[in-house]
Amino acid sequence: MGSKHVCSLHHSSRQCWILNPLSEARDRTCNFMVPGAGENLENTMAAFQHAVTIGTDMLELDCHITKDEQVVVSHDENLKRSTGVNVNISDLKYCELPPYLGKLDVSFQKACQCEGKDNRIPLLKEVFEAFPNTPINIDIKVNNNLLIKKVSELVKQYRREHITVWGNASYEIVEKCYKENSDIPILFSLQRVLLILGLFFTGLLPFVPIREQFFEIPMPSIILKLKEPHTMSRSQKFLIWLSDILLMRKALFDHLTARGIQVSFWNDAFYFFCLAEPASYASPQARGRIRAIAAGLHHSHSNTGSEPHLRSTPQLTATLDP
């Protein structure tokens, strides 16, 4: 049996949201973002609202759970960096959580700070209520069964299964998410990404069923934007180069999207540079590969003339310089 027919057997039967593969506006070259991105205090309602206002198609956020079992949106479990108070979210009731500092360092931009008037840590349900039609990517930051259960309950309560994806780099957390609620699309864990790469390069990928719906990977070359190149060893630079060569494969992305899997590129720096400096965030080789992929998708979209926001047709989310 040919691989084409095998792919059809393992094509995802679930229809899920699809983000814009391209956008003409400079501020929308990034299709999904971590709210904050150097523009507001991170993970606040003001940051979420700003992200949606400028045309972001998907929000990415991190969740933790408080002592009184409230699901909150915060990148860190320990609040020392963001609030100045050395305390864990899980040790406090929601009403006891300290506010964010007035100014926070931007981790992906050297000598840069963001500030804002909204300094309150929001509840996940507040985000769901404010943006009922906006796709959201939820990172379950800690391996906590109660957190996973509570997030699942909220997704079901607000009927967001079709526009929510959840998971973590941890295979164990993703497995727990899937067992808790298989109706919510899941991310590929790091372990599964490595497995997919192994299957791809051995030619076995078409023969293996895949239950994940969101292939979310970093562009390795962006790491060079976060570090001083002269402080990196040759082996570190080699690993970045090798990872870039292995991950940025058009054939792999074509195969996954043909099976109904959403493909997106991300990195802490990626969210910022794709908005402010789209030509500088990736290596020329990586930009060339993404440009070729996205150009083909743009041509396909232009021929159909369809609305690019929420569609059930498999597409690839790519970010590139104009």
Image (cartoon, rainbow, N blue to C red):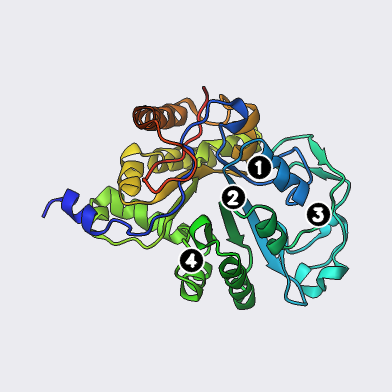
Q: Nearer the viewer, residue 105 or 43?
A: 43
Q: Which residue is mark 4?
A: 171
Task: Please state which of the two labelled residues, at mark 4 or mark 1, is closer to the viewer.
Answer: 1
User: Which of the marked residues, 2 or 4, is nearer the chain's N terminus?
Assistant: 2
Location of residue 10 with respect to 114 vertically, above or below: below
- Label 3 or label 2, whichever comes before in sequence order: 3
Q: Residue at x 25, y 51 (%)?
A: 202
Please give the label number shown on residue 126. none
Relative image position of residue 151 (x, y in whole percent): 61, 69
Q: In the displayed orientation, state which residue is furthest to the left.
A: 1
How many residues crowd around disc 1 within 10 Å: few (fewer than 14), some, or many (20 or more)? some
- Whichever of labels 2 and 1 marks the residue nearer the N terminus, that label is 1
**Among the 4 quarters of the image, the one containing residue 113:** top right
Determine whether the residue tagged by mark 3 lies in a helix, strand or loop: helix
Q: What residue sits 66% from the left and 34% below the top?
A: 228
Upstream in the sequence, badge 4 or badge 3?
A: 3
According to the image, label 1 marks what residue? Answer: 52
Helix, strand or loop status at disc 2: loop
Camera-side residue of 12 and 139: 12
Q: Is residue 160 visible?
A: yes
Residue 164: x and y in percent read: 53, 58
**Of labels 2 and 4, the one closer to you:** 2
Tell me the amino acid under the disc marked 1. Answer: Val
User: Residue at the spot x=37%, y=46% of the render?
Assistant: 314
Check disc 4 and report its element: helix, strand or loop: helix
State left or right for residue 97 relative to residue 136. right
Can you tell which quarter of the image residue 96 is in?
A: bottom right
Disc 3 crowd rating (10 Å Cα; few below 14, some 14-19, many 20+) is: few
Residue with the mark numbered 2: 134
Per the image, the residue denoted by label 3 is 81
Counting residues from the start of the chain, the first of labels 4 and 1 encountered is 1
